[in-house]
Image (cartoon, grey):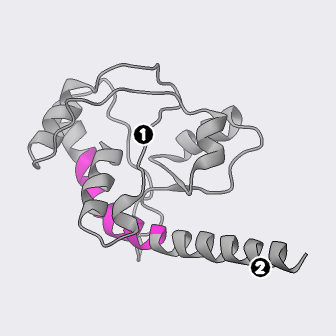
């Protein structure tokens, strides 16, 4: 749900954000599984189609290519840090960029009712504007680093 919601938000942005690749990967996922029917329904209710989703596990290759990771809970990030060695420094909670006091955790609705999936969806939706802003900053820093690296190579 998070990747689909974030993709939807970035589609409304200008380039280059609009063209950023968004991937979904799970810390306990198997490859090729379809989305939980409750996830599909929770997103259908807000006009987003999740019907073609296929799961994939998080791996080192993804870690090396990602601008950022956004997890739902501290335990998700802790598990990621155990699976990816060395742990990525670009991993954040989805809700950590929301200003003011807020619950940073988005409970994982896996195996629960549709209402739990809808509550998770709503918690993600609340985080999306702050994630867009965070990605803008991270992307700008990445571009600056690339340009600095090019300048160093040109001077050598």
Which element is circle 2 on? helix
Q: Is residue 50 left or right of residue 133?
A: left
61 up-or-down from 88: above or below: above
The image shows residue 72 at horizontal and vertical percentages of 44, 47
Residue at image position (11%, 49%) is 46
| In the image: residue 52, left or right of residue 110 | left
Which portion, as a residue range, is magenta?
Answer: 120-135
Q: Closest to the observer: 156 or 112?
A: 156
Q: Nearer the viewer, residue 146 or 123?
A: 146
Q: Main secondary structure of the magenta part?
A: helix
Of 154 and 39, nearer the camera is: 154
Say if 136 sits above or below 55 in the image. Answer: below
| Residue 151 numbered mark, or none | 2
Density class for disc 1 (Cα within 10 Å; few <14, some 14-19, many ≥20) is some
The Cα–Cα distance between marks 2 and 1, rounded to whole angstroms, is 34 Å
- What residue does disc 1 label? 24
Residue at 42% x, 57% y is 20
Query: Does 134 appear in magenta?
Result: yes
């Amino acid at each position: 749900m998070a990747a689909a919601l974030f993709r939807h938000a970035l589609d409304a942005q200008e380039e280059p954000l609009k063209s950023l690749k968004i991937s979904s990967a799970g810390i306990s996922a198997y490859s090729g599984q379809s989305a939980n029917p409750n996830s599909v329904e929770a997103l259908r209710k807000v006009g987003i189609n999740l019907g073609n989703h296929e799961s994939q596990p998080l791996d080192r290759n993804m870690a090396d290519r990602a601008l950022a990771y956004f997890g739902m809970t501290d335990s998700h990030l802790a598990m990621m840090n155990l699976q990816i060695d060395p742990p990525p420094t670009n991993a954040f909670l989805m809700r950590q960029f929301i200003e003011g006091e807020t619950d940073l955790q988005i409970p994982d609705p896996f195996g629960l009712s549709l209402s739990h999936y809808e509550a998770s969806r709503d918690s993600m939706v609340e985080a999306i504007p702050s994630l867009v802003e965070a990605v803008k900053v991270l992307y700008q820093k990445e571009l600056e680093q690339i340009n600095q690296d090019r300048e160093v190579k040109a001077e050598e």
